Amino acid sequence: MSNESLPEHPQPLADPDVYGTVKAFVSAYAVPLLQPEDVFNGWDEHPGPASAREYAVCRVIRHRRQGAKREEVHAQGHDPEDPGRLTVNNLTCCSMQVEFCAPGDEARRRALALETMACSWVGSRFFEQRGISSLHADEIEEKTFEGDAEKLVRRYVVTLHLTYWTGVGLEWPWFDAVTGERVENVDAHHPPQGD
């Protein structure tokens, strides 16, 4: 049985604000522009179609881990009382669905503009500056429905595919002694070969 110390005191690492970032992206690039108060984070936040004639709803429809975990050890200093840090990270793939609703053609135009910008270098840079990678966007889908007073509400959906790192940080205790049966220069048993 080993008396090896295990990392302690787990703390979640800061995740990027995916909802806030997508809301800002929609507010900036889904033209014709919506007011920021008409872009909602999920259906729970949305008070209902009667409150806004034109609006967008952003919601995560899928999270999944991509690839293997990444582990990194960081030294904090030379003091043995000051533990290092071990971070264990996952690359998380997030599918964020953005639904645009409007009585006219604005919903389709906004969805098309968002899909176009998400797949551009501008979209990539926008997300990169916030710790997120924009992989691609699906083609827009029409999901028109009958709203209040039996009027058709145009609804178009685009799904953004994003990745970002999530993880946990732990204290990593350092060793303060090394024990061994024999310590000597490797050259004593394996002399160097001459040219």
Image: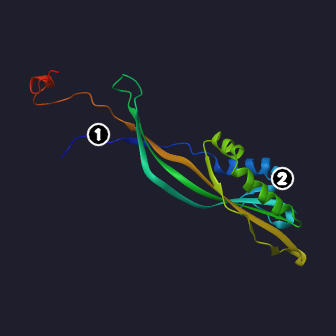
Residue 149: % across, % down = 90, 76
Residue 119: % across, % down = 69, 51
The image shows residue 41, relative to residue 127, as above or below, that is: below
User: Residue 127 falls in which quadrant of the image?
Assistant: top right
> Furthest residue to the bottom?
150
Q: Are marks 2 and 1 in contact (CB under 8 Å)?
A: no
User: Mark 1 Cα within 10 Å, few/some/many (few <14, many 20+)?
Assistant: few
Using residue 51 as the reference point, say whether residue 75 is left or right of it. Answer: left
For the C terminus, give its image quadrant: top left
Residue 5: % across, % down = 29, 39
* Near-viewer residue (186 or 91): 186
* Near-viewer residue (153 or 113): 113
Q: Residue at x 74, y 50 (%)?
A: 117
Q: Amino acid at mark 1?
A: Ser
User: Residue 97 falls in which quadrant of the image?
Assistant: bottom right
Q: Depth-wise, is mark 2 or mark 1 nearer the camera? A: 2
Using residue 88 as the reference point, say whether residue 117 is left or right of it. Answer: right
Q: Residue at x 64, y 47 (%)?
A: 17
* Near-viewer residue (146 or 163): 163
Coloration of the structure image:
rainbow
| Element on which disc 1 rests | loop
User: Mark 2 Cα within 10 Å, few/some/many (few <14, many 20+)?
Assistant: some
| Element on which disc 2 rests | loop
The image shows residue 65, relative to residue 157, as above or below, that is: above
Residue at mark 2 to residue at mark 1: CA–CA distance:
56 Å
Q: Which disc, if any, is residue 31?
A: 2
Q: Which disc, if any, is residue 125?
A: none
Q: Residue at x 15, y 25 (%)?
A: 186
Q: Which residue is mark 1?
A: 5
Q: Amino acid at mark 2?
A: Val
Query: Which circle's residue, 2 or 1, is located before the other in the chain?
Result: 1
